[in-house]
Image: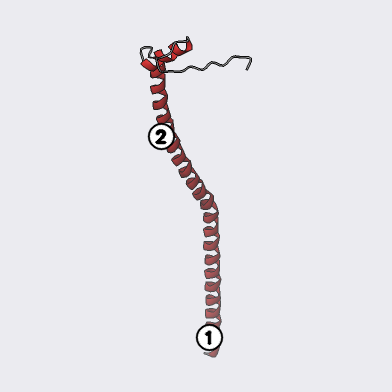
Amino acid sequence: MTASKSTNKANRKRAVSKKTKENKFGFVRTLIVFVIVAVILIPVWNNMISINKKDEEIVTLTQERNTRKIRNDALEQKVEDPTDDEYIADIARENGYRMGDEILFYLSPGD
């Protein structure tokens, strides 16, 4: 019986040793998978953050462009409208006319 007891102990030790090795291998394998996933996901996460910032910039610039387009359209309409009083007054001033209380200054090219 002692021989079988020592054999059983040796078998148990081998089984425990084998399980310990399997547990260590499982931990190392899990750790490797975790590191690989982290190495892949960190750049993806950074790119997503960068893309979101660029999207916000696009929205801001689009709003600014639309505001400027509205202003430009209004100015274009004002310039193209020949019946506007300011437009007529500017053309008259360019031709040497003035309103009663206005003073016009001329620069000569030699001065």
In what element is the residue under mark 1? helix
What mark, if any, has residue 4 been given in the picture? 1
Comparing labels 2 and 1, the label whose residue is closer to the camera: 2
Q: Residue 81 in the image: state x and y as whole percent.
A: 37, 14
What mark, if any, has residue 103 been given in the picture? none
Point 44% across, 41% down: residue:
56
Residue type pointed to by label 1:
Ser
Alpha-carbon neighbours of circle 1 within 10 Å: few (<14), some, or many (≥20)? few
| Residue 6 versus residue 80 in the image, above or below | below
Point 53% across, 69% down: residue:
22
Q: Residue 103 in the image: state x and y as whole percent.
A: 46, 18
Q: Nearer the viewer, residue 83 or 98?
A: 98
Q: How many marks?
A: 2
Residue at the top extreme? 95
Residue at the bottom extreme? 2
Q: Residue 100 in the image: state x and y as whole percent.
A: 39, 15
What mark, if any, has residue 63 been given in the picture? 2
